[in-house]
């Protein structure tokens, strides 16, 4: 693959491995790492700690409402994300930007020559296992099992929907559960390895 564009965008649903992959890639390429989590975190992940009133409110919401709220949150973040991308491009400052808010429907609107976009995904069972493993490490898991399940179902649904949009938009999709897939992308993007 050719040298990547100054901006590399790594999107995907929760727990798919965006932060780990982006951090490694940014270090290898000597680029600034930016996470959309630092811009505004959605209050959905019910571990390690969530205030009781948030837990009660989250538990009362339907799955449809939870997913809608996530998408609205990402929509509201997009102008700030776009501003970050544009400002880095204007001064030719190389960066790696990662986060679930990099929804394919927004990334597809960018000039393809201005960024290299990747969408990380996994099958439903892989994501469920990964999220349950992390949630069970929380001492209060049993008290929060219901909202953990809501979070997992929201994330699995979001993963499926974003994957469909990413494929339709011809964004490179990488199955993180496939052996060697992330290593192959790393080699494509980093001429030093």
Image: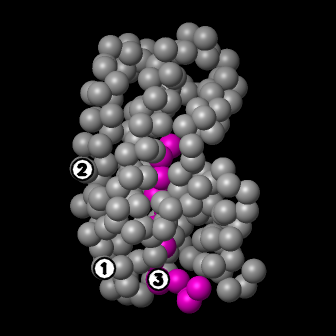
Which quadrant of the view contains residue 24? bottom right
Q: Say which residue label 1 marks.
A: 111
The answer to whether residue 132 is visible is yes
Q: Residues within 10 Å of mark 2 (few under 14, many from 20)?
A: few
Residue 144 located left or right of residue 54: right
Give the SS element for disc 1: loop
Residue at the image position 35 percent from the left and 56 percent from the top:
165
Q: Which residue is mark 2?
A: 76
Q: Position of residue 173 (x, y in %)?
A: 50, 62
Q: Where does label 3 land, which residue?
A: 6
Mark 2 lies on a secondary structure that is: helix
Q: Locate the N terminus by quadrant.
A: bottom right
The segment highlighted magenta reads: 1-14
Compare marks 1 and 3 and give the one earlier in the sequence.
Answer: 3
Q: Residues within 10 Å of mark 1 (few under 14, many from 20)?
A: few
Q: Position of residue 94 (x, y in %)?
A: 49, 81
């Amino acid at each position: 693959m050719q040298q990547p564009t100054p901006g590399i965008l790594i999107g995907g649903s929760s727990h798919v491995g965006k932060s780990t992959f982006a951090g490694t890639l940014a270090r290898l390429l000597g680029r600034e790492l930016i996470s959309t989590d630092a811009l505004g975190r959605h209050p959905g992940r019910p571990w390690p700690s969530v205030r009781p009133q948030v837990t009660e409110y989250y538990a009362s919401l339907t799955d449809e409402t939870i997913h809608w709220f996530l998408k609205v949150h990402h929509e509201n973040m997009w102008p700030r994300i776009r501003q970050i991308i544009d400002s880095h491009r204007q001064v030719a400052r190389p960066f790696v930007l990662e986060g679930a808010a990099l929804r394919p429907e927004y990334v597809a609107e960018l000039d393809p020559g201005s960024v290299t976009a990747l969408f990380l995904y996994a099958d439903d069972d892989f994501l469920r296992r990964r999220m349950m493993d992390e949630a069970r490490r929380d001492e209060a898991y049993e008290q929060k099992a219901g909202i953990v399940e809501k979070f997992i179902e929201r994330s699995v649904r979001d993963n499926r929907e974003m994957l469909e949009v990413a494929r339709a938009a011809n964004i490179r999709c990488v199955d993180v559960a496939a052996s060697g897939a992330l290593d192959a992308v790393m080699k494509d993007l980093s001429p030093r390895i």
